[in-house]
């Protein structure tokens, strides 16, 4: 057994590529070695800005000899077939064996491959890995053909045994494998020879290189926290930045500086974002005030002045960056305190989507929808509409233009500066949430109303122009928007009828369409005798949402009949892209609701609720009330996990199947008339009594949305149904009793289906 050590030394590797590159090196090398017949015990890979390292323990010294028998053609086969077999095996005819096979004699080739030394295999696999390495981007330099992420400078490749280390004979584009590496670029640039992985890591440490990325992370975290604590401050945690910085340095030297007084008035998030994005600084916070008062930078070198020169240079660059940020902040405050009209006007010229109008038109739709949603979530309609109107104005601010990740947050600052109500300012920040499955869900009523309106407008708009997600493609993040709506409703326990809200959103598009330039231009053509008054109202944009679809259908029908009267119908369709979708108003709401249901299935699957259980609940009335739907699904899932639930499901399916077969055979529906007087057995009479008792419990429970109570009442039917099937024959020769029992089965089916559609449950 031997250990293998490989190091690929290069110019600086981008930090974002290092973790995957280390894993790719480990996997590609070990897979290649195993495929070539070697085995190993353990493998580890490491990355620093200048090197990829692989350490393999317990590698076999050589591959095993392989003996393979390959069956060929019959001995009397055509010459071409025999020659083809010889070429495939690399043998001559005299080395083939003749063996009897059934009724014929066939050729067999016996191929023996001797074992190969590990060094030869390692060299072969390593060359293939280097040449085919899956870098996201790579470059070719000099006159060679080799491509690497940055110029490759050296290869260390050792096989380490108990009696010493052997350099693997290896060369690629003029680079010859050695047993030497180099340390830190400035502190220890000279070569260092190594004899094993332990020796390699120790000598790198002495040469100012920390090989392990987690060790660099821990050192930076500890040193930064210590520097901040010494001055009564604390580090703002940022794991992503910590990982990135650990990939930028081989020898982390942590330094701390102070932010100049003139910049301390900037919002802490602005300071933090500016320092992180532009200079990879960690923010240092005063825990007493919450202000960002300092920064920590990580150098890759120790200096005689203990980093003073480095800090001075960084502070100079930081001053310029923060001066820009202060200019943006002061300019934005001027606009905010003057009513934000400048941003409103600028949003009118920003296209949201070429088929859905400008950003300002979208804001108007969201405001109208938020006003409709507000009463259902406990929000003031006027506040909700006002919040929707200002929530996205910060998109045209200078600060968000520089740091897009601050959108929403800056909106809150600007709304506060404008003197708007606190609920409006909070909605500006929170209406984007939740952005992902782990993001916090807003709870303030105004924020919830605007967040729902924003996401539902996005869904209905792109649905209307037929830009729906397909497969793995979802360029407008509609799945995320639907999941956001689901989490807002479930997280706040909101009893909202989604069908009504979808129609409200659709109504805003219809009004825009009715008011559009081309339809107004051709308004007289719609003024016909007998025209419904709601059509005139629709055309003016004054129709109530209950009448809007009648107006849409009238206009669409008129257009179909009189399309030739329009001077430029193609241009009209381009100007009003939703026009074509209005011809299918009946399908629109159902299609969007189905999309919500699909996303809800994914959401609940992570909570252990099966798709078939959800389908059983979706088939029930009120399936657009997601809170009600989830409560029903949770109760049904819990019930089916019990023994009573499993057995009742089997009893229900048996009853439903027998009933379906009889109805198909007889051509009639057995749906009423079961009478206990025709019962032959005590168990049969007991089932009638049990159904009466369950019905008396289930219907009030369902009316009160007490699904657990309804399931409990269903569970009481398990034993009577089992007992009935044990003693009673359904298809008896007595037709009166047969019909009575089939009607009894119909009663079982009907009562179970009042709770959930158990026909959709598997099992």
Image: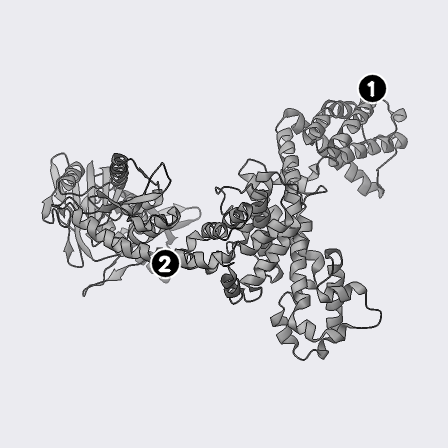
* Relative horizontal placement of residue 646, taking residue 329 as reference (left or right): right
Question: In the picture shown, does residue 556 fall above or below 271?
Answer: below
Residue 546: % across, % down: 75, 56
Q: Residue furthest top?
A: 682
Structure colour scheme: one colour
* Relative horizontal placement of residue 733, taking residue 282 as reference (left or right): right
Q: Residue at x 53, y 46 (%)?
A: 422
* Relative horizontal placement of residue 309, taking residue 525 as reference (left or right): left
Q: Residue at x 77, y 33 (%)?
A: 751
Question: In the picture shown, does residue 399 fall above or below 575?
Answer: above
Residue 55: % across, % down: 23, 41
Packing grade of label 2 (10 A; few <14, some 14-19, many >=20) is few
Q: Residue at x 81, y 65 (%)?
A: 532
Residue 99: % across, % down: 36, 46
The residue that mark 2 highlights is 327
- Decide which of 405, 94 is in the foreground and name it: 405
* Disc number lying in front (2 or 1): 2
Where residue 520 sits, quadrant-wise, is bottom right
Where residue 763 sits, quadrant-wise, is top right
- Decide which of 563, 667 is in the foreground and name it: 563
Residue 285: % across, % down: 33, 41
- Secondary structure at badge 2 equals helix
* Relative horizontal placement of residue 252, taking residue 432 as reference (left or right): left
Packing grade of label 1 (10 A; few <14, some 14-19, many >=20) is few
Question: In the picture shown, does residue 569 fall above or below 411?
Answer: below
The residue that mark 1 highlights is 682
Mark 2 and mark 1 lie on one chain; the one further toward the N terminus is 2
User: In which quadrant will I find the N terminus?
Assistant: top left
Q: Are marks 2 and 1 in contact (CB under 8 Å)?
A: no
């Amino acid at each position: 057994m031997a250990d293998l050590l490989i190091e690929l030394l290069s110019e600086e590797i981008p930090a974002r590529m290092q973790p995957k590159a280390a894993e790719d090196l480990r996997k590609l090398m070990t897979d290649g070695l195993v495929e070539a017949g070697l085995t190993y015990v353990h493998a580890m890979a490491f990355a620093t800005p200048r090197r990829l390292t692989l350490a393999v323990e317990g590698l076999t010294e050589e591959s095993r000899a392989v003996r393979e028998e390959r069956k060929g053609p019959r001995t009397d086969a055509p010459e071409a077939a025999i020659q083809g077999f010889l070429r495939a095996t690399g043998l001559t005819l005299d080395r083939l064996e003749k063996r009897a096979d059934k009724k014929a004699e066939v050729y067999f080739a016996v191929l023996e491959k001797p074992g190969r030394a590990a060094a030869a295999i390692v060299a072969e696999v390593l060359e293939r890995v280097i040449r085919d390495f899956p870098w996201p981007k790579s470059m070719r330099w000099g006159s060679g053909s080799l491509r690497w992420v940055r110029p490759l400078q050296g290869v260390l490749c050792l096989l380490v045994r108990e009696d010493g280390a052997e350099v693997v004979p290896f060369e690629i584009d003029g680079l010859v494998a050695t047993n030497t590496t180099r340390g830190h670029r400035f502190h220890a640039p000279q070569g260092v020879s190594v004899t094993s992985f332990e020796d390699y890591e120790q000598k790198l440490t002495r040469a100012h290189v920390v090989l392990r990325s987690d060790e660099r992370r821990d050192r930076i975290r500890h040193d930064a926290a210590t520097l901040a604590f010494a001055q009564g401050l604390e580090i703002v945690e940022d794991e992503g930045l910590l990982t990135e910085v650990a990939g930028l340095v081989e020898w982390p030297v942590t330094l701390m500086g102070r932010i100049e007084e003139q910049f301390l008035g900037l919002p802490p998030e602005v300071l933090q974002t500016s320092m992180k994005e532009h200079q990879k600084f960690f923010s240092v916070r005063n825990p007493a005030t919450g202000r960002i008062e300092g920064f920590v930078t990580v150098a890759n070198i120790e200096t005689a002045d203990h980093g003073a020169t480095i800090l001075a240079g960084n502070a100079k660059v930081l001053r310029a960056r923060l001066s820009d940020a202060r200019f943006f902040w002061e300019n934005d405050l001027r606009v905010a305190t003057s009513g934000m009209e400048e941003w409103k006007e600028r949003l009118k010229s920003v296209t949201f989507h070429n088929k859905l109008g400008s950003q300002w038109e979208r804001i108007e739709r969201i405001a109208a929808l938020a006003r409709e949603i507000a009463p259902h979530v406990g929000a003031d309609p006027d506040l909700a509409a006002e919040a929707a109107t200002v929530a996205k104005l910060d998109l045209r601010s200078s600060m968000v233009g520089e740091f897009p990740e601050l959108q929403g947050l800056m909106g809150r600052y600007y709304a506060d500066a404008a003197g708007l109500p606190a609920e409006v300012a909070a909605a500006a920040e929170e209406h984007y949430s939740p952005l992902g499955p782990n993001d916090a869900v807003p709870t303030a009523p105004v924020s919830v109303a605007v967040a729902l309106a924003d996401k539902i407008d996005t869904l209905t708009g792109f649905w209307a122009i037929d830009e729906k997600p397909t497969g793995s493609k979802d360029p407008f993040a509609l799945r995320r928007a639907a999941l956001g709506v689901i989490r807002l409703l479930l997280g706040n326990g909101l009893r909202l009828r989604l069908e009504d809200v979808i129609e409200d959103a659709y109504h805003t598009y219809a009004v825009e369409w009715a008011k559009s330039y081309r339809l107004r231009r051709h308004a007289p053509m719609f003024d016909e005798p007998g025209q419904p008054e709601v059509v005139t109202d629709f055309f003016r944009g004054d129709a109530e949402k209950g009448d809007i679809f009648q107006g849409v259908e009238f206009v669409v029908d008129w257009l179909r009949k009189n399309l030739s009267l329009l001077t430029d119908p193609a241009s009209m369709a381009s100007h009003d892209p939703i026009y074509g979708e209005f011809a299918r108003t009946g399908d629109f709401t159902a299609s969007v609701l189905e999309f919500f249901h699909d996303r809800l299935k994914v959401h609940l699957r992570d909570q252990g609720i099966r798709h078939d259980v959800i389908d059983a609940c979706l088939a029930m009335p009120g399936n657009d009330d997601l809170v009600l739907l989830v409560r029903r699904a949770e109760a049904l899932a819990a019930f089916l996990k019990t023994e009573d639930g499993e057995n009742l499901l089997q009893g229900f399916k048996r009853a439903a199947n027998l009933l379906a077969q009889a109805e198909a055979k007889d051509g009639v529906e057995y749906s009423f008339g079961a009478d206990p007087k025709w019962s032959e057995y005590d168990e049969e009479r007991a089932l009638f009594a049990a159904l009466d008792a369950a019905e008396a419990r289930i219907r009030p429970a369902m009316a009160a949305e007490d699904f657990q109570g309804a399931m409990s009442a269903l569970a009481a039917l398990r034993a009577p149904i089992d007992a009935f099937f044990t003693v009673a024959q359904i298809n008896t020769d007595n037709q009166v009793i047969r019909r009575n029992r089939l009607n009894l089965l119909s009663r079982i089916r009907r009562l179970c289906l009042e709770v959930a559609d158990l026909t959709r449950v598997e099992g």
